[in-house]
Amino acid sequence: MPADLSVCVISFWGRHLPKLVKVLADATAGQIHVVGIRSPEVAFEKIERRKNVKMFLLVKKVHRNIFGRIINYFLVQLKILCIILTLYKANDVFIFFVGGELFFFPILILKIMRKKVILMPAGITPKVYSLKNGPFYNFTSLMMRINLHLADKIIIYSHALIKDMDIERYQHKIVISHEHFIDFTKFKIYKKVNDRLNVIGYVGRLSEEKGILNLVRAIPLVLRQNCPVSFIICGEGELMSNIIEFIKNEHLEEHVLLTGSIPHEDVPRYLNKMKLLVLPSYTEGLPNIVLEAMACGTPVLATLVGAIPDVIKDSKTGFLLKSNDPKHIAERIIELLNKPNLLEKVSLNAYNYVKENFNYEKTLEIWRKIIKKF
């Protein structure tokens, strides 16, 4: 395949999208078209201005009722189809990225047009709906299965996700890769981990699949051990009111800081305050925050889900939870705070690992090889 391959990316907006676009724009001399879908009230990172990148922005309305959400799902696909019909001749490959893996109609039309379709799910969307007891679990599962069958290639973050996603039958078209890279001019160690106060942190969405309520329920269990510790929870989401209520009922106001959403440029400052970042998720792909914490020398304590075990080796580059049960989370936090030498060792190991494996040049080289196979 020529080095001037043209690619169209269809995706919901998030921190992953600008990184994928940057890598693709540098990996090929061809045109990169981006069909980005976002909600009007959600902040988003801008995509770097490039000569070979052209944007098409769709604003998705937010509906609380099921009927409105169903209608919106089909309307968004119709809008995407209209854009694709103007672009299909100019693009060799269409990548359906975060959330895009559920867009059945655009994928079907592209296959009828004999265009190459790549699915790149950043996580397991049906499982997220299942954890939220959402009404769309069966529907998203069906859409995912059909689209996996239609796709020419499936790009996922880890071999472990093959089993989690139940896609063993598609081994012949699975590619293991990622778009992650760290800006080490921003994400770096400002303060050694053992020079920091006993601050336990969380950065991410306050939603069911992230297991944040399990971490919050672990807080009083930690404090009952007379452990001098405080907690910082950064993020917004549908569980914010539940968290506030729990903190109030347990009289934890003096021990827990809820920051709400924080600008991405402030994340390194918060990470450098933490002695431990806890991510007790039920499901994940490869979370940016794990890599960013490692770059800041902040040890990560996370569940063994998604691609996390690929980068977190227990007691070497981080720490793994056997479960996200609040009692177990509390026990691990107390155990690790009492092992400053281990924290220091893991902090340095994590920094060195992410510096070697998630620098921009390494990620770019991976995508240059992938593009040659397209």
Image (cartoon, helix red, strand yellow):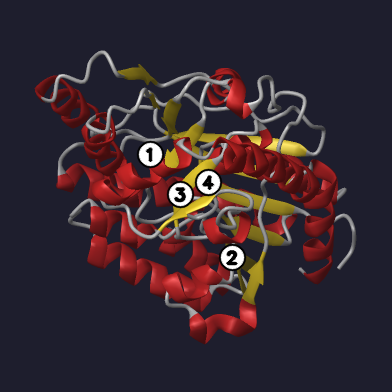
Query: Crowding near pointer 1: few (<14 within 10 Å), some, many (20+)?
Result: some
Q: Is residue 102 visible?
A: yes
Residue position for label 2: 158
Task: Give the amino acid type for the residue marked by disc 2 in the picture.
Answer: Ser
Using a 10 Å C-alpha cutoff, classify the residue at mark 3 as few (fewer than 14 neighbours), some (14 to 19) or many (20 or more).
Answer: many
Mark 1 or mark 3, which has the lower sequence index?
3
Residue 294: image tag: none
Q: Which residue is mark 3?
A: 302
Which comes sooner in the sequence, label 3 or label 4?
4
Kind of residue at badge 3 = Ala
Q: For the residue marked with disc 1, what is the amino acid?
A: Ile
Please name whichever residue, 122 or 38, is drawn nearer the observer in this view of the structure.
122
Amino acid under disc 4 = Pro
| Contact between labelled residues 3 and 1, with CB atoms less than 8 Å apart | no
Above-or-below relation of 278 to 268: below
Quick check: 266 above or below 203?
Answer: above
Q: Nearer the viewer, residue 333 or 72?
A: 333
- Residue marked by disc 1: 334
- Residue drawn at (40%, 74%) of the image: 145
Q: Are marks 1 and 4 in contact (CB under 8 Å)?
A: no
